[in-house]
Image (spheres, rainbow, N blue to C red):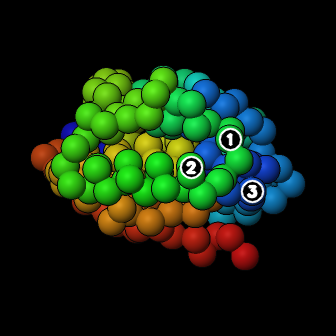
Amino acid sequence: MQKTLYIVRHGQTDLNKQGIVQGRGRDTDLNDEGRNQARQFYEAYKGVAFDKIYISMLKRTQQSIQPFIDMGIPFEKLAGLDELAWGIHEGQPATPETKAAFLDLMRNWLDGNLDEKFEGGESPNEVKVRQLEALDVIMSHPEEKTVLVCMHGRALRLLMCILTEQPLTQMDAFPHQNLVLYKVVYDGSKFTIAEANNALHLK
């Protein structure tokens, strides 16, 4: 079975613009710039014959690819594609204290402490479990040769580790901005990144 995945991060929201962490618990809308990014992505990729669209349960992912849905392409929401939950820090203003807490958590993750998490939040290992469930769904349809996936920043980093068989400690090796593209090809045995952090469609 061969399959091509076009994986994008959602477009910009006001919290993105303000540098505030959203996470799984903040169901925010795209802002004007995010909607413009969505239009630009659509114009660049409307000619791709997507068989299916997979999005998270959060509306910012659907808003980012709504024009493709409007074309009649079937779509499915998967909770496994949701952003990592940041718990008590979601939606909170950035302060020196919260910045220090995030830096400490990131160091823990990079050191291999992948069960660490904020109060009320999720660890990378917990996100991996639900991402593998989502991937099982996506890969269980061999008839869907070309698939569009819209998800979230930290979750995208973790999924790329899974697809490329890298440890989750390598998550920061996959940079991204709002509505950038990772194109990944599955040849029947392994996933290969064909395009990484592609932002050419964002003029």
- Point out which mark residue 18 bears: 3
> Residue 176 at what x, y percent from top left?
50, 63
Q: Residues within 10 Å of mark 3 (few under 14, many from 20)?
A: few
Amino acid type for the residue under numbered disc 3: Gln
Residue at the (66%, 53%) spot, across then down: 94
Side of 61 where 101 appears, left or right: left
Q: Secondary structure at mark 1?
A: loop
Location of residue 128 (image quadrant): top left
How dense is the environment of label 1, judged by Cα within 10 Å: few (below 14), some, or many (20 and up)?
few
Residue at numbered disc 1: 92
Q: Position of residue 179 (x, y in %)?
A: 61, 57
Q: Dots 1 and 3: beta carbons under 8 Å?
A: no
Identified by mark 1, the residue type is Gln
Name the mark on residue 52: none
Label 1 vs label 2: CA separation?
Answer: 9 Å
The quadrant the C terminus occupies is bottom right
**Looking at the image, which residue is at 75% across and 56% down?**
18
Q: Secondary structure at mark 2?
A: helix
Where residue 55 sits, quadrant-wise, is top right
Check disc 2 and give the amino acid type. Answer: Thr
Q: Which mark is residue 98?
A: 2
Query: Which residue: 51% across, 70% down?
Result: 198
Q: CA distance from mark 1 to mark 3?
A: 11 Å
